[in-house]
Image (cartoon, coloured by chain):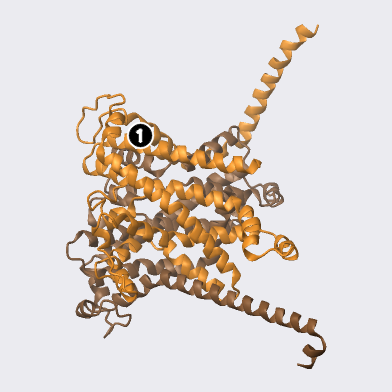
């Protein structure tokens, strides 16, 4: 008080400072309020999904919007897995995702290594030809891909579902970038020890490329796990359906068994949430990379 | 002398170049072996596929009958006068025009807001990101339930005294409903793209702006936006390409109805190809879509690049 009286200029400054802090603080509060509101709008369908998946049918029909199941039950999960056949679909999805994951990682990394390190004639042209396919809209290739698979006798087969996913231009591009950044000295050492191209790839490059392989692997898995249109078209027997097509079938039935849908959705989302928690940095890193390069 | 010496020069280099090439080939032939599995798959499922697609778009082609007569441009002219195709292109245009700017603006807003806070940043990022990695079939099913006449959305609207419509069964609201759900599901992905772009902007620019006394708004427009150019172009172009091909949400939520109000081009392609088995006709429609996508991508890139010159 005494200071303000003796030094009015200081008082004004002090007031300004307080005003600045106040606006800054209210700004922060507004930002948080906005973020929390937006976060809630992102998460509320999942809260309902989770809550409803533990409700019995009668509980669901009387209180579909309560967030706490009374009493919680696992019977919907049992229903979804047995009557809803989610158990079968889940097994198929795991099989498809695992096959595409392993084979595509091998095929992509082998090609990427070759494009990055083996100086064969025509390399640049062939690499451009691979990259160019990234521009093709899936809309145009869907019908001919089906006809080719049909011609090869692959409709309604396990191979038919996974085969087109065994190579990816994006994966080859991503891994090639990574291989290019590995110092050549490491390979030269292996070369002197008498390693051929394949030996260098298998023993030196693949172990070094682990972070890039994990990033690509997560993307391949997520992609295959959510893949819907291709299995829908190529398969006709429900015993071979992946979970995505399986869940879509619930929609076809006139009377939708919503609790089973929610249980099924929770089952489908669960591996993805786990994967995201485990590999968050890889996923974020991979997406960031694609944005910065573009 | 020079006229005589000149022709012999290229002949010599061509021969030596050929020898050099052969030497290189002998040393590096395993390279072809390594790319062959990927090369074979990409050749079959991209290159042969696209040529095949173009070929059948000029033919009457279904899987069942053996007769596949050449029809010239018949499929294309038929598509241009097909009412269903016209409706689907109109709906798809509306969808693209609404969704691309909306997702770009909202995800940019999320990224900028998320960058302002220190505490809970990782948590917000995770929450916004979850819809992006959930299979679109699952999110579509969840929203079918939310959009029911007495569903979650209308319950929330009731709280603020608005009587919600029967979202998916009303021709006026079905397409907007799908758009809202898609925006909800995509903003998290582009937020990550923009966060990465924001992290690339050197702190010095913001400090300089502060010294010059620039406000938040001014700083945002004259520093953040121009320096996010690459991320913005990426978001805009990839979103446009994806939005033109929208399918799964529509297939699950409305099947193109009510009264074709949510019929999109890809839905129509699916309908003709896999429900009526008119593969040639469906391919022609998909090429029309490709043409439109190509035109708009090229236009966007040209616009963005000419901007750079100023």
Q: How far across and down, in percent of the image, does residue B250 sit?
A: 31, 53
Left or right of residue B158: residue A224: right
Look at the numbered disc 1 and give the secondary structure of its residue. Answer: helix
Q: Quadrant of residue B289?
A: top left
Horizontal arrangement in the rendering, residue A31 relative to residue A233 (left or right): right
- Report x, y in % for residue A196: 62, 45
Q: Position of residue B249 (x, y in %)?
A: 33, 56
Instruction: Tell me if residue A157 comes above or below residue A125 in the rendering.
Output: below
Asked whether the viewer can see residue A23, the reply is: yes
The residue positioned 35% from the left and 63% from the top of the image is B139
Give the crowd class for mark 1: few <14, some 14-19, many >=20 residues within 10 Å: many
Q: Which chain is brown?
A: A
Residue tagged 1: B53
Camera-nearest residue between A187 and B216: B216
Q: Colour of chain B?
A: orange
Question: Where, by quadrant of the figure, is residue A67 drawn?
Answer: bottom left
Q: Quadrant of the C terminus of chain B?
A: top right
Q: Is residue B111 above or below residue A259?
A: above
């Amino acid at each position: 008080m005494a200071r303000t009286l003796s030094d009015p200029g200081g008082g004004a400054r002090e007031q300004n400072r307080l005003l600045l802090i106040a606006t800054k603080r209210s700004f922060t509060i507004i930002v948080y309020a906005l973020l929390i509101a937006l976060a809630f709008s992102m998460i509320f369908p999942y809260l309902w999904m989770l809550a409803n998946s533990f409700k019995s049918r009668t509980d669901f029909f009387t209180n579909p919007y309560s967030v706490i199941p009374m009493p919680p039950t696992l019977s919907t999960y049992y229903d979804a897995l047995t009557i809803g056949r989610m158990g079968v679909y889940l097994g198929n999805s795991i099989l498809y995702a695992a096959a595409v994951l392993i084979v595509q990682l091998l095929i992509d990394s082998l090609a990427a290594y070759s494009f990055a390190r083996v100086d064969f004639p025509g390399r640049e042209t062939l690499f451009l030809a691979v990259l160019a396919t990234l521009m093709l809209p899936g809309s145009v290739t869907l019908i001919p891909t089906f006809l080719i698979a049909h011609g090869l006798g692959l409709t309604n087969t396990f191979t038919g579902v996974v085969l087109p996913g065994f190579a990816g231009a994006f994966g080859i591009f991503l891994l090639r970038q990574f291989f290019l950044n590995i110092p050549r000295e490491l390979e030269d050492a292996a070369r002197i020890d008498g390693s051929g191209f394949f030996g260098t790839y298998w023993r030196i490059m693949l172990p070094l490329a682990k972070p890039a392989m994990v990033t690509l692997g997560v993307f391949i898995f997520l992609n295959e796990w959510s893949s819907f249109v291709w299995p829908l078209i190529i398969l006709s027997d429900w015993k071979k359906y992946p979970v995505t097509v399986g869940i879509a079938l619930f929609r076809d039935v006139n009377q939708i068994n919503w609790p089973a849908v929610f249980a099924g959705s929770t089952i489908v989302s669960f591996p993805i949430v786990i994967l995201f928690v485990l590999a968050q940095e890889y996923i974020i890193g991979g997406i960031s990379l694609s944005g910065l390069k573009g | 002398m020079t006229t005589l010496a000149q022709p012999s020069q290229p002949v010599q280099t061509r021969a030596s170049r050929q020898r050099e090439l052969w030497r290189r080939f002998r040393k590096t032939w395993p390279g072809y072996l390594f790319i062959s599995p990927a090369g074979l798959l990409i050749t079959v499922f991209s290159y042969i596929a696209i040529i095949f697609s173009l070929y059948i778009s000029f033919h009457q082609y279904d899987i069942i009958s053996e007769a596949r007569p050449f029809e010239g441009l018949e499929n294309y002219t038929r598509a241009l006068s097909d009412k269903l195709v016209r409706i689907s292109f109109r709906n798809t245009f509306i969808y693209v025009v609404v969704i691309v700017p909306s997702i770009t603006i909202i995800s940019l807003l999320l990224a900028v807001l998320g960058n302002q806070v220190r505490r809970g940043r990782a948590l917000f990022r995770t929450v916004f990101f979850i819809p992006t990695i959930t299979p679109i079939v699952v999110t579509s099913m969840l929203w079918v339930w939310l959009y029911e006449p007495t569903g979650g959305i209308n319950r929330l609207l009731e709280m603020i005294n608005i009587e919600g419509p029967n979202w998916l069964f009303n021709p006026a609201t079905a397409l907007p409903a799908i758009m809202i759900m898609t925006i909800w599901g995509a903003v998290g992905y582009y937020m990550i793209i923009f966060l990465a772009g924001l992290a690339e902007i050197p702190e010095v620019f913001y400090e300089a702006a502060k010294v010059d006394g620039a406000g938040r708004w001014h700083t945002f427009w004259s520093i953040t936006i121009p320096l996010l150019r690459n991320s913005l172009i990426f978001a805009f172009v990839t979103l446009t390409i994806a939005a033109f091909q929208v399918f799964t949400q529509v297939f699950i939520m409305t099947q193109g109805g009510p009264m074709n109000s949510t019929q999109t081009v890809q839905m129509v392609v699916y309908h003709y190809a896999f429900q009526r088995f008119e593969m040639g006709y469906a391919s022609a429609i998909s090429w029309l879509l490709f043409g439109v996508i190509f035109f708009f991508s090229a236009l966007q890139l040209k616009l963005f690049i000419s901007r750079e010159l100023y």
